[in-house]
Amino acid sequence: MFDLVLLCDERKVYDGQVSEVYVTTCNGPTSIRKNHQPYMSKIVGQVTYATPDGSFHVLDIADGFVYTNGLLCHVVVDITS
């Protein structure tokens, strides 16, 4: 598990542990897990994350960005209209 902070339209919508974060970048889909190498990218389409109870949460987005250092992942997005 690692920490995810998800900000949407300037408000925090999730701040907690996750097992995985899935995003779509201009280079295609990317999966981020604990100890991922430092990574930053623009994202579009959807953000999906898996919480400790095994459930998946999907958020449709217009655009945003993701940054991780392997222990903490920040996702900042705007919602699709």
Image: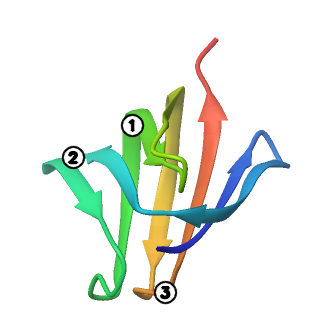
Q: State the residue position of label 2.
A: 26
Q: In this view, does 37 lie above or below 75?
A: below
Residue at (27, 48) in percent of width and height: 25
Disc 1 to disc 2, how far (Cα)?
Answer: 8 Å
Q: Which of 79 and 53 is in front in this view?
A: 53
Disc 3 to disc 1, how far (Cα)?
Answer: 23 Å
Other residues around mark 1 within 10 Å, as few (<14) / some (14–19) / many (≥20): many
Lower position in the chain sequence, tag 2 or tag 3 = 2
Q: Residue 66, image x and y in percent?
A: 47, 62
**Any mark on residue 68, and which?**
none
Q: Which three-letter amino acid code belongs to the residue tagged 2? A: Cys
Q: Which three-letter amino acid code belongs to the residue tagged 3? A: Leu
Report the number of discs.
3
Disc 2 to disc 3, how far (Cα)?
Answer: 24 Å
Q: Is residue 59 left or right of residue 78?
A: left
Q: Which three-letter amino acid code belongs to the residue tagged 1? A: Val
Q: In this view, does 4 lie above or below 29?
A: below
Q: Residue 9, image x and y in percent?
A: 78, 39
Other residues around mark 3 within 10 Å, as few (<14) / some (14–19) / many (≥20): some
The C terminus appears in which quarter of the rendering?
top right
Q: In this view, does 62 lie above or below 44?
A: above
Other residues around mark 2 within 10 Å, as few (<14) / some (14–19) / many (≥20): few
**Any mark on residue 71, and which?**
3
**Any mark on residue 44, and which?**
1
Eye-nearest disc, 3 or 1: 3
Eye-nearest disc, 2 or 3: 3
Q: Is residue 63 left or right of residue 3?
A: left
Check disc 1 and report its element: helix, strand or loop. Answer: strand
Q: Which of 51 and 22 is in front in this view?
A: 51
Lower position in the chain sequence, tag 3 or tag 1 = 1
Lower position in the chain sequence, tag 1 or tag 2 = 2
